[in-house]
Image (cartoon, rainbow, N blue to C red):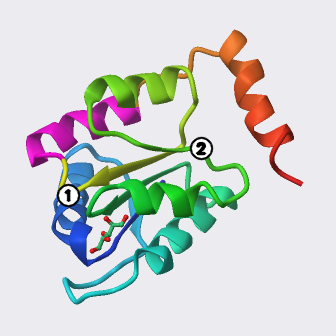
């Protein structure tokens, strides 16, 4: 299950992502926002990230204007490793090396076709483990109480 959320600045892409995930037969939960009315990204990013943190969703995809605010919000949650990605390379490495479980993208940053590629790579690339497993474990053991 994939947790989706956006603010107003990412709303259009969130709606397009719902169609993309349906085409890919991947189930999702939409944690809002529900319109292009101006709103605050932490509200929505928090809801989706909490669902991933609690294990109710396996992954999260968050959209705001830049992807940066949403990634900051998501990374406040226990067990979350969120990556704001502007390229397919970043998305691939975020999975291979960081085992990122939340992707954040910016509707004001990346074109839609690029976001489609970024999302597909994020959802299909496995974690490499090995030395990266030790490092990922330390992300949490050194920072989470
Ligand atoms: C909203 O104007 C914008 O600040 C927000 O979508 C996001 O880019 C923040 O990081």
Along the line of sight, the residue nearer the viewer: 45 or 28: 45
In the displayed image of the protein, which residue is found farthest to the right? 145
Q: Which stretch appears magenta?
A: 110-123
Give me the residue at 63% from left, 50% from top: 80
Q: Is residue 92 above or below residue 38?
A: above
Q: Give yes or no for residue 47 being in the magenta stretch.
A: no
Q: Is residue 100 above or below residue 44?
A: above
Q: Which residue is mark 2?
A: 81
Along the horizontal axis of the image, is 126 left or right of 66? right
Give me the residue at 29% from left, 47% from top: 25
Along the horizontal axis of the image, is 37 left or right of 135? left
Residue 4, position in %: x, y? 39, 63
**Is the CB atom of the residue marked by disc 1 within 8 angstroms of ligand 1's nearest atom?**
yes
Residue 39, position in %: x, y? 33, 86
**Disc 2 versus disc 1: distance between alpha carbons?**
20 Å
Along the horizontal axis of the image, is 97 left or right of 91? right
Q: Secondary structure at mark 1?
A: loop
Q: Which residue is mark 1?
A: 107
In the displayed image of the protein, which residue is found farthest to the bottom? 37
Task: Tell me, for residue 62, which label it has, or none.
Answer: none
Query: Is most of the magenta stretch helix, strand or loop?
Result: helix
Classify 10 Å Cα crowding around label 1: few (below 14), some (14-19), many (20 and above). Answer: many
Residue 3 visible in the snapshot? no
Within the displayed image, which quadrant is ligand 1 positioned in? bottom left
Residue 68, position in %: x, y? 40, 55
Give the quadrant of residue 41: bottom left
């Amino acid at each position: 299950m994939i947790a989706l959320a956006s603010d107003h600045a990412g709303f259009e892409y969130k709606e397009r992502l719902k169609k993309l995930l349906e085409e890919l037969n991947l189930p999702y939960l939409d944690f809002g926002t529900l319109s292009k009315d101006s709103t605050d990204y932490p509200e929505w990013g928090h809801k989706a990230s909490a669902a991933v943190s609690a294990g109710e969703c396996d992954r999260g995809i968050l959209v705001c204007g830049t992807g940066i605010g949403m990634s900051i919000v998501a990374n406040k949650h226990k067990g979350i490793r969120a990556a704001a990605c502007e390229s397919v390379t970043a998305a691939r490495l975020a999975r291979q090396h960081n085992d990122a479980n939340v992707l954040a993208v910016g509707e004001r940053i990346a074109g839609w076709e690029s976001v489609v590629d970024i999302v597909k790579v994020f959802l299909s690339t496995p974690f490499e483990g090995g030395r990266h497993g030790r490092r990922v474990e330390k992300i949490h053991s050194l920072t989470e109480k």
